[in-house]
Each structure stands twice: as structure tokens, then as C-alpha cells.
Amino acid sequence: MTENQWNPENIPVADPVWTPVQQQSPLPPPPPVFTSTASASGSTASQTRNSISKKSFALVTLAALIAGTVGGIVGSSLTSDDNSSSSYSAPLLVASEKSSDSNSVGTTQIAKVAAAVAPSVVTISSTTQTADGSGESVGTGIFLTATGEILTNAHVVEGATKIQVRLYNETEPRAGKVLAADVGNDLALVKIEGTNFKPAQFADPKAIRIGDAVIAIGYALNLDGGPSVTTGIVSALNRTITTENGALNGLIQTDTAISSGNSGGPLVNYKAEVVGINTAVARGDTSTAANNIGFAISTKELLRVVELLRKQSNGEKRKEGYLGVGLTDRADGGQGAVIANVQSGSPAAKAGVKEGDVVLAINDEPITGRAGMIAIVRDALPDETITMKLERGKEIITVKATLTERTTTG
């Protein structure tokens, strides 16, 4: 593998088999670990003791109280007849040094995968400065190339005035630089100086299936030491969620535990191949219960976005496609996005799209709802022709629209 970091051949990809499932989820991504360092006056010793730092958290320990009954039991019942030593003084059984090797890798497949991937995983600390003071967010990243190109979530480095990257088994951070960021797709490229880093290997998107065992590796809660390792399965494919920056589509849903600080870290299979970049978890509220629902940006999406980010870092302007429609979700429980309005003279109008049409698919990719369609059109390029499958009344029709460049945020 060449060390030319801008060559797409630098990201190794393994061989395929895929069964997609289309669904939708409206749940937002979590922030990375964030600590504000703005000073506050009038703090007391009590407040100091009760504060929670970025590396500590509250623990509740349950202790069982064991009640014993002491009766008038005396004499020979408390000692042996031969005055031998009490059995309570016997030494504990401890394995000898020859029985274990603290430097060896565990025997499970999870341990072997974690050991193989950990050198590719880094901690990313981003310092921000506002009128209220400074703060630090901490997330995870993964090497794309041996020459220091790192992939992480855009929300980990958003607004950063200083980036520090710490490598596995290193104690001192290195200075990092944000090369490019795509907030809509929540991915960013970071660069550090140096060579001979260990790049990750990415799984072919078609090889990812529901039920596959996966492992999340990252610096959860910015705890001391190496990365945290959690495991689970691929719960669903091609999920779409809405965020404050738009929508993320093509996501992998997993029941693997993902916490703040895991953002930007890899979700890997049992072959030590990256299947996605951890980006979000679902949280319950007063009306919704959410347990073990996390999301990762799939390799299908990130391989495409990485090339766009590389072009952007080389000075090429990021362009988005524009269709010219307003959208709503279906209210009848069906799948698809409803055309609420069509802009006069827009690509949609020229293609014959009408208000009330239901978009079922674009380029043979099923549309699960409004958010999914927004993401697909946003990621398409100007002058690209898309094929739309529409439901108009009881009729199913197909139209083609040639997109123009989006010039506004609308």
C-alpha cells in the first residue's frame, strides 16, 4: 500500500455479500465528552467535592449487611481438640507467575480483534473558545493512512481552536489539524505529522449483514488508559436519523454499548475490519424508552464521503445537489416521502414531479421518509441525473431529474 495519503487506493477494502434492510429513526446523535473550564466565583469546599470532572463519574455501591447471631457458645465448639491452627489462617490460592502472561492477548476472538485494531485508534481532544470561556470535547478517531490521515466525527472537532491527538500506548499528545469537515454527514479528516502509523482496514459494505457480531472500540468518557471495548451485533441496516444539522442515512444500528467519547471511533467485525464509525445513541425521554440503540456511519457512506473530504482539503469546493421540492412524511403509516410543494423552474418541476406525489425510491434506493430523501439529494452532485420512483394516486411512475447546485441552505 502506497503512503500517498490522497490516493483512494490507500483505504483497503475486503470482499463482499450484503442484504439491506430499510428503516427509519428520528433520534439525534449524542455530543462527545465535553468539559467547560470557565471559572465560577463563590465555590465552596462542598461544591468541589460534589463536582464531576471529565474523568470521573458517580458510582453507587450496594453493600449487603450480614447479621450474625452470637449465642452463649463457648468451649470446645470454638477450638479443635488438638489445638491446631484455625482453618481461617490458610493462605489464599493465587496462580503463579508461570500460569499467566500479563502482556499476552486474551484467547477470545474479541480480545484478538481489539488487540489488532487498538493501534489504529486515537484520542482526539478539541479545545474551543467562546465568550463564556474555553471548553474541551474528547472523541475518538481512526487512522486511514500510514502518513497520519485520521477520520473522526465532525461534531468532535466542530469549532475547535486547537486539536490534540494521542496515540495508543503513548503518553504525550501530538498536534493535529482539521483538513476538512462535512457537518451534514458528520465526518471530518484530521492530520498529524509522522509516518508508519497503522491504518485500519475497512469491510466491503456488501459484506455487512444483520446479526453480525461487532465490536466498538473507543475512548468512552475519556477514561484513563487504553480504549474501551464493547460488543454486540448489527441490529439493522440503512437506518436514517435526523440531527440538528440535517439527516444521516445509510446508518448501521447496533446494540453495542456506545458512550460519549466513542464518537468517531470504529465499529468492527470479527475480522478486525471497520464496518462503521460510531456517531450516535438513542436516549429515552418522558414518553419513549430507548435501550441499547446506537448508530454508526456505514462504510458505504464513509468511503464516498472520505473522497469528497480529500478533494475539499485540496481546495475543491463542496457542492450539493438541488431538486427544488418541499417534503413531508407520510401520515398514513406508509413508506416514502410526500412532495409538499414544487419550486417553479426547478429540476423537479422540469421532470414533471407534482405536489402530492409520494417518492418511494431514488436510484433504486428505497426512501423511508423525508429525512432519508433529504440526505440522498444533498449527497448527490450538481448535474447528476437521478431516477425517482413515484406513487401518484394508484399509479406508480418513474421520472428522471437532473440536479442543479444548491446555492442556499433551504
Image (spheres, rainbow, N blue to C red):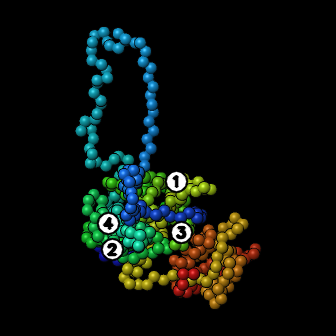
Residue 18 rendering spot, x and y as whole percentages? 52, 63
301 above or below 254?
below
Q: Nearer the viewer, mark 2 or mark 1?
A: 2
Name the residue rendered at 34%, 62% in the picture.
Answer: 123
Residue 395 rendering spot, x and y as whole percentages? 74, 76
Numbered badge on residue 281: none
Numbered badge on residue 177: 2
Neighbour class for label 1 at 10 Å: few (<14), some, many (≥20)?
some
Q: CA distance from mark 2 to mark 4?
A: 9 Å
* Mark 3, secondary structure of its residue: strand
- Sequence-wise, the earlier of marks 4 and 1 is 4
Name the residue that disc number 4 marks. Answer: 165
- Sequence-wise, the earlier of marks 4 and 3 is 4
Does the residue at mark 1 contact the one at mark 3 (Cβ under 8 Å)? no
| Residue closest to the eye, 179 or 55 | 55
The three-letter amino acid code for the residue at tag 3 is Thr
Q: Nearer the viewer, mark 4 or mark 1?
A: 4
* Mark 2, secondary structure of its residue: strand
Name the residue that disc number 1 marks. Answer: 292
Q: CA distance from mark 4 to mark 1?
A: 29 Å
The three-letter amino acid code for the residue at tag 4 is Val
The three-letter amino acid code for the residue at tag 1 is Asn
